Amino acid sequence: MMEILAQSVGLVVFLVVGGLVLLLVLIVAGLYNGLVRSRNACDESWADIDTELRRRYNLIPNLVESVKGYAAHEKDTLERVVQARNTAMANTGSPESQARDENMLIGALRQLFALAESYPDLKANQNFLQLQEELSNTENRIQRSRRFYNANVRDLSNRIQVFPSNIVANIFSFTRKEYFEIEDAAVREPVKVQF
């Protein structure tokens, strides 16, 4: 009888310990999968930003060509826009370095638009107006994508920092992502152009 009781107690202990181990494995797996989903959401939303930036890069040469015919003597401004575009397009670094190059490009584009204000014929050119509208829409999509990416980065950072997922994040070497902070073209001061 003692043997049966000892076996029963041993079986209960085994089942309890096995159940606790299984529960712990399920919790760790759930936390790990949540971290992976958050990291993948960051990567996917960064790809969305990249798509919109490429779209902007493709519009800029057409915009510069439209301005060239009306403001050929403004070569310096046009070259700055092209140089800023090429620098931003070539950047494959961190979100911080990409943001730095994007801010330079935004500044150059603002100078281009300020320049266009000085040429009434250019402002009335249908092709220029269409390109300007297209670029404005692209800027809006970039801002939406940036906000979405930064929200995903925030969520990943929270998962990496809060208990108990921080333990799993450390074990599996999850790292935080950088925010993508570029200046909103709409809130910057207007560029002053003097002739």
Image (spheres, rainbow, N blue to C red):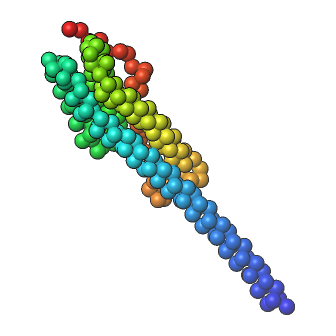
In the orientation shown, which residue stands out farthest toward the right?
A: 1
As rendered, which of 133 and 193 lies closer to the eye?
133
Report whether residue 102 is seen. yes
Residue visible at 46% across and 42% down in the picture: 149
Residue visible at 37% across and 44% down in the picture: 51
Location of residue 2 (image quadrant)? bottom right
Q: Is residue 83 above or below residue 27?
A: above
Of the 4 image quadrants, the one containing the C terminus is top left
Q: Position of residue 55 (x, y in %)?
A: 34, 40
Q: Is residue 96 above or below residue 48?
A: above
Residue visible at 79% across and 90% down in the picture: 3
Report whether residue 76 is seen. no
25 left or right, relative to 105: right
Of the 4 image quadrants, the one containing the N terminus is bottom right
Q: How many marks?
A: 0
Q: Position of residue 71 (x, y in %)?
A: 19, 18
Residue visible at 39% across and 34% down in the picture: 138
105 left or right, relative to 195: right
As rendered, which of 47 and 150 lies closer to the eye?
47
Q: Position of residue 4 (x, y in %)?
A: 81, 89
In the orientation shown, which residue stands out farthest toward the top?
A: 195
27 left or right, relative to 55: right
As rendered, which of 84 and 128 lies closer to the eye?
128
Q: Position of residue 156 (x, y in %)?
A: 51, 47
As rendered, which of 145 and 155 lies closer to the eye?
145
